[in-house]
Image (tube, rainbow, N blue to C red):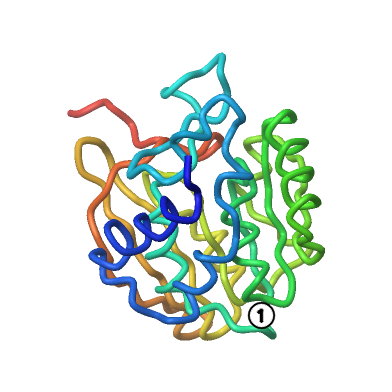
């Protein structure tokens, strides 16, 4: 496979049409080698507009890399700055952590699967990323964020949740941003939350999508009265 041509086509045919036009984001996507973060047997999917399964045993029902256009759009919307501290929940392959690390001062990424945490650390090491730290935590701990390192300028949920816990929103600095995919199938929404005050957050709908659930986050009751 001609990886450089495939990368160029991914950016021009998938990512730009999704309104990702920030030159710095596009340059980063052209530089960070996505194929190095995809499981070895699935590297042919590195530049395809699809979610890539990360654990063979779980297949498509388990943790996945987000589509390239979704990763790119979230990165653009967050507008991460070089002086900022970032928290990611759901490390997966480590690719999003790598993108964030190229723009931020420091990245903490939480992963509840030991195998994925190990792989992500190795992927980041091979990519020369030194300012992203992968922490292995339980699913329940991950859903609570990382209060010991709070507050954060940016928080990213690399997967979907039924709703964003207030405890995570409270870990944002004033002006801090949180991106998450929220809702239920068949339609979920990517949303951007910005902390406007001690007890105030603004919320903006970005786009509709569907992604795999993050483990450890509560689901709404299915009972109706």
Tag 1: Cα neighbours inside 10 Å, few (<14), some, or many (≥20)? some
Question: Looking at this view, is 45 or 150 the one in front?
Answer: 45
Residue 86 percent location from the top left of the image: 64, 68
On the image, numbered disc 1 is attached to which residue?
Answer: 84
Question: Which residue shows up at 80% across the image and 51% down it?
Answer: 125
Q: Quadrant of the C terminus?
A: top left
Residue 204 percent location from the top left of the image: 29, 72
Q: Quadrant of residue 137?
A: top right
66, above or below 147, in the image:
above
Task: Give the structural element (helix, strand or loop) at label 1.
Answer: loop
Q: Among all residues in the image, which is located at the extreme top?
A: 57
Question: Looking at this view, is 211 or 149 the one in front?
Answer: 211
Question: Which residue shows up at 37% across the image and 65% down it?
Answer: 73
Is 122 displayed left or right of 153 in the figure?
right
Is 141 displayed left or right of 133 in the figure?
left
24, above or below 115, in the image:
below
209, above or below 99, in the image:
above
Question: Looking at this view, is 150 or 107 the one in front?
Answer: 107
Residue 138 percent location from the top left of the image: 70, 35
Question: Which residue shows up at 41% across the image and 71% down it?
Answer: 193
Residue 174 percent location from the top left of the image: 55, 85
């Amino acid at each position: 496979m001609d990886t450089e041509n495939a990368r160029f086509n991914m950016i021009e045919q998938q990512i730009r049409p999704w309104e990702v036009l920030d030159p710095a984001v596009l340059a980063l996507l052209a530089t960070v080698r996505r194929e190095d973060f995809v499981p070895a047997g699935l590297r042919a999917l590195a530049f395809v507009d699809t979610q890539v399964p990360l654990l063979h045993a779980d297949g498509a029902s388990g943790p996945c890399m987000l589509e390239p256009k979704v990763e790119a759009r979230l990165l653009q919307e967050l507008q991460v700055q070089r002086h900022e501290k970032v928290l990611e929940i759901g490390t997966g392959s480590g690719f999003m952590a790598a993108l964030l690390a190229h723009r931020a001062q420091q990245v903490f990424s939480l992963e509840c699967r030991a195998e994925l945490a190990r792989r992500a650390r190795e992927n980041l090491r091979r990519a020369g990323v030194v300012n992203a730290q992968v922490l292995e935590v339980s699913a329940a701990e991950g859903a609570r964020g990382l209060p010991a390192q709070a507050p954060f300028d940016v928080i990213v949920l690399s997967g979907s949740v039924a709703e964003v816990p207030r405890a995570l929103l409270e870990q944002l600095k004033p002006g801090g941003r949180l991106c998450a995919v929220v809702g239920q199938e068949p339609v979920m929404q990517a949303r951007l939350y910005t902390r406007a005050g001690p007890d105030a957050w603004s919320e903006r709908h970005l786009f509709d999508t569907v992604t795999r659930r993050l483990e450890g986050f509560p689901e709404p009751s299915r009972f109706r009265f």
